[in-house]
Amino acid sequence: MSTLAEQIVQTEAHRSIFETAVRQLPLPVCAAFGAPAQPQPVSFQNSGRALSTKDSDAVQKQFPLSVAASGNLVLTSSGPNSGASQGKRVAVLFSGGPAAGGHNVVCGLKRILGAGNTLFGVKAGPKGLLKGNLFEITDANIDFIINTGGFDFLGSDRTKIKSDEQFAQVRETCIKHNLDAIVVVGGDDSNTNAAVLAESLFTGVKADGSGVQVIGVPKTIDGDLQIGDLLSISFGFDTATRIYSEMVGNILQDTSSSLKYWHFVKLMGRSASHVALEVALQTKPAIALISEEIAAKKQSLASIIDHIAQVVVNRSHQGMNYGVLLAPEGLIEFIPEMNAMIAELNDALAHHAAAFAELTDNDAKAVFIGSKLSADNAALLESLPHYIVNMLLADRDSHGNLQVSLIPTEQLLIDMTKQRVKEIDPKVPFAAHSHFLGYEGRCGAPTLFDAAYTYNLGLTAGSLILDGRTGYMATVTGLTTGGMPQAIPLAGLLNIERRHGKDEFVIEKALVKMDSPAMQFFVSRRDAWAASDLFASPGPRQFWGPTTHQLPISVALNSGATSLMFNIG
Amino acid sequence: MSTLAEQIVQTEAHRSIFETAVRQLPLPVCAAFGAPAQPQPVSFQNSGRALSTKDSDAVQKQFPLSVAASGNLVLTSSGPNSGASQGKRVAVLFSGGPAAGGHNVVCGLKRILGAGNTLFGVKAGPKGLLKGNLFEITDANIDFIINTGGFDFLGSDRTKIKSDEQFAQVRETCIKHNLDAIVVVGGDDSNTNAAVLAESLFTGVKADGSGVQVIGVPKTIDGDLQIGDLLSISFGFDTATRIYSEMVGNILQDTSSSLKYWHFVKLMGRSASHVALEVALQTKPAIALISEEIAAKKQSLASIIDHIAQVVVNRSHQGMNYGVLLAPEGLIEFIPEMNAMIAELNDALAHHAAAFAELTDNDAKAVFIGSKLSADNAALLESLPHYIVNMLLADRDSHGNLQVSLIPTEQLLIDMTKQRVKEIDPKVPFAAHSHFLGYEGRCGAPTLFDAAYTYNLGLTAGSLILDGRTGYMATVTGLTTGGMPQAIPLAGLLNIERRHGKDEFVIEKALVKMDSPAMQFFVSRRDAWAASDLFASPGPRQFWGPTTHQLPISVALNSGATSLMFNIG
């Protein structure tokens, strides 16, 4: 029997009591893969369903080999693949910000590739692919990483493979390691990169003239990689929103215990508000701002603040001098007048740089530059707290642009709300704390949903490789009805967008739609949540017991599910 | 069958899937209370163990009735109380910051008082006691709040009952509601208040000349209410530190996934570093600062920064441009030279107020006031980042003192570390994010340890009341050997401390001891944790399955336990 100190030393290096136990959790697999204990690869056939975008013609010109091979048709599994390839050498890499479940993608890949093929891990993301930094993944590795959070088994980075030199480096790595396939685990940009790589490596890479297959796996905690019923959610979203929801639920419980604070919580998600919407659906706070709605309604900052302040005052008059507000990280960038004002400000600063530079006093600077703006924009600038004005006048990037994302949204909202509350009813107290929930949610242990989903995504990605496919994103549909491995032709998703002054192929980010069932449900309940305490505490995610099999609420609503339970296997 | 939207509406108002499930969790009870399904009150007898402090004589003079009755002797349960009182009217209140498990104290109280007695809840803390804001607690209430987090069933506040007028108000409430007993759930200050109330209400409150019993229950997430083997931990500490540990574990996992950030995490706990120590023991980060050690070693700010920077540089040289640092909220106040400098600064600002006020430029102000300080203090002031110097020169409370707690510790450490790293090795990258983990941890659903512990504390407090006791704090000892209800005489804990220029009776805060097993274990491992990645992710706390029965590591070490499993019942 070891001493207690020895037992604690034994929990070092990913061996906490929890991590040790969670590694033993059995994972369900889609019926298509056979018995969970020994999943078998499936083969795929074209479904009747073709994908297209407004730019399909241009895409076809740029991705002729991929489009000719796939016809932009969705693939669906067609039973066990008895003639699955053997001897394949496959590399897997993580790309971009980490998300819970990445390790299980690797585990699913390794299991389905089996002893007859070899799986390599690419270290530290796309950069590792350029450098050829690969190592062979063993069964012991898999037993150790399964059901654990983070991307730390491989590491990740944000290198985008774009230049000819980079493509040549990838080819070199493929040749050096004699690779047959690459699996890219990433978000919308990384899957666009996978499409480009698939086309580039389609043929003529190896000595015998054959190519290297490329398969994407849909990851992002932001939830903005969604493709209708083909991809109801990317992995990592469930875990991140459940972690944030627990924290927000705890804070809500604190507000109605301490009875004296508002908490303004900024949530990760710059481009879309899926995270904020999901956390709101989980916790039912007094206020949740949805960027897409603000943009759609062209709401002004003043009207947003007025709405918040009115809720604060109304709740106070009902005896509730407390509450919680949720705001997405990208909020400010969705307020049309803010963008317009900042654009004019950038111009004015550029045109009057010399005169501006002569002023040393911040107030004088603000007055001077305000006089160069249109009346509306000048008034908006003047309405902002001093530290925001100073930021707007000071911080410019090398292109003379302001990074709107640097504005501390939660503090801005607090300060402007405080002022507005005072105007509406000076007797109403308003004391607020701010929070940013971000990094805490990316690398937690995956929920059972994310763990099962990613394991099956890995099984699907591996099956696609063993079936000789390239240029697809693995997906699992039917998440409440047992799950079905499918594959989405990546070229069928591509649009052309103007970025940094150049046309680029991109997978469009999925924003929160105003007419989606999840948004409509939120709209139907939010006034009741603002008027009284109807919040709920979703609690920490559970891995054993009666509450393990939950789907994200927004995903369940948007996919027309009849319950909040997922069902894979 | 309800629609999904209807099902989601049904989760409003504390009815999430988790909350509904966790209410059904069975709770273990100490064998002394009999069958868990129907716990029975115990009676108490004096143990041989008397408590004393350096001020026991003075305490005896101020608390003559309490001391005469208890003899400052610890009580231990002496079997079932077949002659337990009936018809008692008992009020329970929460005092101070919320902590997980408060609701279960109420549940334990209600269960042990049974149908023969009446339990009232005091709304919104001590203030509610002054106002007589009471309501009767029903069995349905108990079924609804059991195992849920927060203090929101009753609410709380920080009112200290001190003045004669306040004592008169409490008496009025006791008479109006015909109370026989009050249970105060709170921290060190609140239990001191309970001792004072017990003495004040000892006799002559009601028409028949009898008094009102007062029993304290030990709560605080900070963990600084500990009394050797009689009270190895206050409730709420386990839940808070497990919540923080999950977040820190997730962030650690993120650092070794993203491979490019340091995260500096400030943890709640102003007076003591128990929280930081426990989270460090759970997660094994590169650096954890312990305030008590810094004070004991009289470390300078420069030496602390140098140590941090050295770890940053060493890790970078090993290829790790990332890591996590934990710092307790109260850190700055424990650095002796900072306190000395601020004290001299306060004096200098007071003595040279007129000349200082004439200066408008911040740099000039700093130079001027620096010239009025001793050389050491002037050098320390000059070493601080500008925004800290500006704070030190600007913000004073009404007594002319600076609130050291306003200094943004985590940002100060980041900025000074960045500078020092650059001096040691300019090639080492250092990008850091800061976090403050506080409010998220106070109101989460209690861990099974806190849930069981608080339920048994409630059973113990109720038993003390039915046994006619007053002036005790309920406790449960033997947390790894089944649990034993005991009672600590509050007057036996009191010391005299000078606070706000007056002698006051207080229960001393328990600080982290340098020679405690928990601290010694931490010291024995921290260099290894700094040198490489040995971190662990303790994961979210679990309520079902194999990992539910954990004790805080520091508590297990300090109490000489042989495993990390608690055992009640």
Image: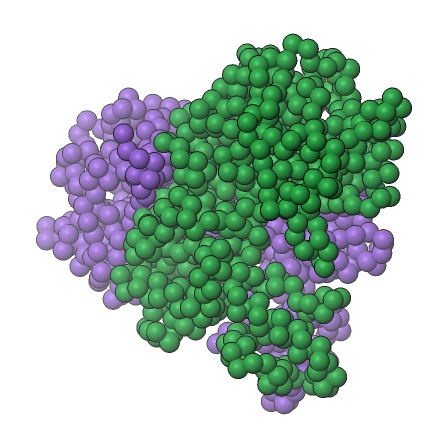
Chain colours: A green, B purple
Q: Residue at x 49, y 34 (%)?
A: A229
Quadrant of the image for the N terminus of chain B?
A: top left
Q: Position of residue A468 (x, y in %)?
A: 71, 21
Does residue B403 appear left or right of residue B431 in this picture?
left
Viewer-closest of B476 and A414: A414
- Reply above or below: B212 against B559: below
Viewer-closest of A389 and A428: A389
Viewer-closest of B96 and A273: A273
Q: Quadrant of residue B502?
A: bottom left
Quadrant of the image for the C terminus of chain B?
A: top left
Q: Is residue A535 at all visible to an observer of this figure?
A: yes
Does residue B475 appear left or right of residue B262 in this picture?
left
Viewer-closest of B505 and A358: A358
Q: Residue at x 39, y 43 (%)?
A: A517
Does residue B452 appear left or right of residue A492 in this picture?
left
Does residue A472 appear left or right of residue A203 in this picture?
left
- Reply above or below: A495 against B43: below
Q: Position of residue A25 (x, y in %)?
A: 54, 21
Q: Position of residue A333 (x, y in %)?
A: 56, 61
Q: Residue at x 42, y 68 (%)?
A: A303
Q: Position of residue A298 (x, y in %)?
A: 47, 64
Q: Is residue B480 at all visible to an observer of this figure?
A: no
- Reply above or below: A147 against B489: above
**How many numbered circles does the render carry?**
0
Q: Residue furthest left?
A: B207
